[in-house]
Amino acid sequence: MGVRRWLERHALSLLGVATTAVLAVLFYFPVAIVFADAGSPDAVLDVLTDQFYINEIFRFTAWQAFLSTIASVVIGLPGAYVLSRYEFPGRRTIRSLTIIPFVMPSILVAIGFVAMFGQNGVLNDALGIVGLGPYSLLYNLPAIIVAHAFYNAPLVARITNAAWESVDAREVETARSLGAGRFRAFRDVLVPQLLPAIMTGALLTFIFTFMSFPIVLALGGFEFQTVEVWIYALVRDLDYSEAAVLAVLETTLSLVLTYAYLRYEARQTAATRASRPLARKRLFSGVRGLSESLERAGILAYFLAVGILFAGPLVSTVLESVTGPNGFTLRYYEFLITRQVSGASFQTKPGVAVQNSLLFGVGTLLIALPMGVVIAVLSRARGSGGRLVEAIAMAPFAVSGVMVGLGMLRGLVFGVPIAGTRIQVGGAVAIVAAHAVAAYPFVTRNVAPMLAGIDPRMVESARALGASRFRSLMDIELPLVAAGLAAGAAFAFAISIGEFDSTVILATGSSSYTMPVAVERYLGNRTLGPATAMGTVLLAVTAVSFVVIDRLGGRWENG
């Protein structure tokens, strides 16, 4: 009894220590190995003074990220405006779809663009009917930028929409009553309040596109080399030292940008939802005057354009998986079944990919869910302790999956000598570990805000009646945040299912490949049909995860 009570009394502390130990082994140790592989500062200086890396790699990476950010903001802002200012059927559904960047595997975006805009894609098939084409619209910089905009414009729209809905209508009305016209009220009242949110969305987009990997690899290949693609090429050539130097430089830059993002976000948390938000207008009624008619027409044109941009690639993936030169066919799915039944062991089998993805997803849940909950609880501590825990929890956001995968490969997979014995873990275990590192922050960010919203008097009452801190957490707090837990679990599972960056490094030459890796391998072999069939299976699994997250809600829905 004494031991049980002691364990219960110190359970949170023990879980905190265990979580720190797991985080140290699964994240900080692999990252430290990459830093060690980078060697002396001279090696870093050599890269920084190499004109090839400066002009061809880093400059192009920053340039494509800058253009992708501009495109994402240009496409995302009108969406935020429409969602904030208009009421129409399906508005909530469209708003929910802005969660896509967090749950959709980026390799799906790549396969979708190939299926729609590729040489044998849906667009060229349609143009061929009227005697035009085919045109080559992929494997260039504009294709990369548009694909990045597909992925990140919803993020910009979501963040800006939240800020727009927090504007108090009385401030605008006051400006108008003092004689300000509609444009001046927008410029002097709305823009200053929206600008931080726009900058936050732009900064996040720049970070994501700077570290973008599968989209650039699939739509640009080794001809358009970003830092991530070049690191992957170096790893394939077994040049780990130079890959480590590039990974260290990229991580340093992303840490700086992430710090800037956190500063912005900290300012945003002070803002609360307006007591009287701006009233929404009905989109399909109440039109008065030529200017409103033109505005409604512009909105419908915008919806049509973004509908083609966002739905087109996904629909094309499904269409290409069931159509061939002679019309409807299931031969690509039959190919996958044949490959699974009679394929050689070195070939990519779809059944193995699906099985691995599901198993890795469950394994990720078992690690990421308790880690995320423990960090969410610890981050509630006031003062510098809570901020330190939050900073530690956010660290994986600033480190790319390629960096983590490289560290895992060099450490846990190759083995670490301890007391004369080399300790190694298999590729599958390393993949689950990398997925858990990427997933647990999403659990934390779903659970922590809901924990903060619980009335502290309920916990204090339980403590006064003799319950330990751990018991009050288990019996009172966690049941109250069950929806956040479920949403965090769905996030963790979806991230594991779609993770590509670290998996493609750790699964090389093994049987532990996942669905995204299988899609990339089929696509790399220029077999579009099987790639789209495999992509459709991945799309179905991702869609189920999205529905779960959307139904259960969580921080991202409220943000």
Image (cartoon, helix red, strand yellow):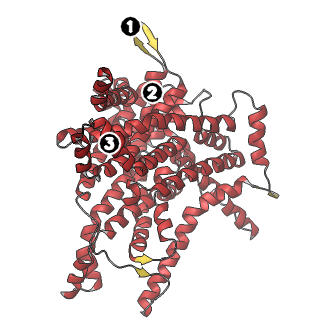
Residue 461, which numbered label? none
Q: CA distance from mark 3 to mark 1?
A: 36 Å
Indicate left or right for 100 with 65 as reference: right
Check disc 3 and report the residue beneath it.
376
Asked which secondary structure carries label 1, the reply is loop
Asked if one can make out residue 51 in the rendered structure from this viewpoint, the answer is no
Determine the residue positioned at 50% across, 73% down. 302
Amino acid carrying mark 1 in the image: Ala
Q: Upstream in the sequence, badge 3 or badge 2?
A: 3
Q: Quadrant of the C terminus?
A: bottom left
- Residue 36 in which image quadrant: top left
Q: Upstream in the sequence, badge 3 or badge 1?
A: 3
Q: CA distance from mark 1 to mark 2?
A: 20 Å
Check disc 1 and report the residue beneath it.
419
Amino acid carrying mark 2 in the image: Met
Determine the residue positioned at 74% across, 28% down. 344
Determine the residue positioned at 38% across, 31% down. 27
Check disc 2 and report the residue beneath it.
408
Indicate left or right for 360 with 344 as reference: left
Would you call the spot at circle 2 few (<14 residues within 10 Å), some (14-19), or many (20 or more)? Answer: many
Amino acid carrying mark 3 in the image: Ala
Q: Upstream in the sequence, badge 1 or badge 2?
A: 2
Question: Hey, which residue is sitting farthest right in the picture?
Answer: 326
Indicate left or right for 280 with 134 as reference: left
